[in-house]
Image (cartoon, helix red, strand yellow):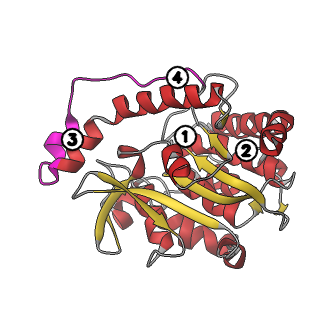
Amino acid sequence: MSRVYEDLDKIPRGQASDVITEGCLVLEGGAFRGLYTAGVLDAWMQNDINFRCTIGVSAGALTGTNYMAGQIGRTARANLGYRHESSFVGMESVRKAHSVIRLDFLFKDYNAIEMLNVRRFFDPERRFVAVATNCDTGKPVYFDRDYCGNIFEAIKASASMPFVTPMVNVDGINCLDGGSTCKIPYQWAINEGYEKIVIIKTRENGFRRKVSERKPATTIYRNHPEFAAAHDMSAENYNRQCDEIDRLSASGRVFVVAPSEPVRVGRVEGDMDKLGHLYWLGYDDGMNILPQLKEYLNK
């Protein structure tokens, strides 16, 4: 098995334009399944689709960071080039960060290789929100870039997977993965009054999670019972969200992009061919859906 994606040099490069697309972009998580989202967004950035507001959960927040920075291909180059770097995913990560995935690799180590465009990321004309879960209340927390003490810590918290990653303290709140309580934050966008809401999912339309009677979080997080209860209900909540998104999409209230084929990629997938294929699936889907997207945005 290749440790680096063989066609890494084919990933597009460039800086997105300063054109602003009105509306809110909502990004689902899914760990390395976020490469699908990265492909869609690279295609859109190449075509001047740069939303004024982006809200992301977990991998969606990580991918959304590079989208906000306008850096075409940066998410893909980091994940397809360094998935098997032990200080990112592996034993060295466990040693350094007590986590299977060391998110500081993306914010520090990879930043030394390809620096984040911080000026663009903090553009005051654009809004960015990362969703994490408050481990004390079991409720989602929406960390707005402009009102958060350290938005990069909030993004790390959003992507910190339960059971395998320590809690991250953000503004005095102990947090974990936003997907534990809100996997697709479309309702936040509705509540904020956005007329145009575009959702990128990392699972194909029709996918629903299996609901298990096992409650693992109740045991592991017994000192955080509200978080444990919320996490153990996350599959049911996700399925309800997907049902509601289908209804909103059918009525034209939201616009949904989802993989055009079933996704067979694990959260911590190591097969580089699968990961590369998922990126290009997203890229092609993003290109192919541009006419419908523009029609929705211009209504």
Q: Could you classify mark 1 by the number of other residues whose Cα lies within 10 Å: few (under 14), some (14-19), or many (20 or more)?
A: some
Image location of residue 228, percent across then percent down: 21, 45
User: Mark 4 — residue?
Assistant: 207
What segment is highlighted magenta in the picture? 205-225
User: Mark 1 — residue?
Assistant: 270
Q: Is residue 225 above or below residue 95?
A: above
User: Mark 2 — residue?
Assistant: 39
Three-letter amino acid code of the residue under disc 2: Gly
Three-letter amino acid code of the residue under disc 3: Ala
- Tell me the residue at 49%/71% (across/down): 151
Using the image, tell me which numbered label, if any, was put on residue 229.
3
Mark nearest the camera among 4 and 1 is 4
Residue 53 visible? yes
Q: Give the quarter of the image for residue 229.
A: top left
Q: Is residue 179 left or right of residue 275?
A: left
Q: Is residue 261 above or below residue 241?
A: above
Q: Earlier in the sequence, mark 4 or mark 3?
A: 4
Name the quadrant of the N terminus: top right
Q: Are marks 1 and 3 in contact (CB under 8 Å)?
A: no
Q: Kindly report the distance in space between the C-alpha atoms of the residues bearing marks 1 and 2.
A: 18 Å
Q: Earlier in the sequence, mark 2 or mark 3?
A: 2
Q: Kindly report the distance in space between the C-alpha atoms of the residues bearing marks 1 and 3.
A: 31 Å
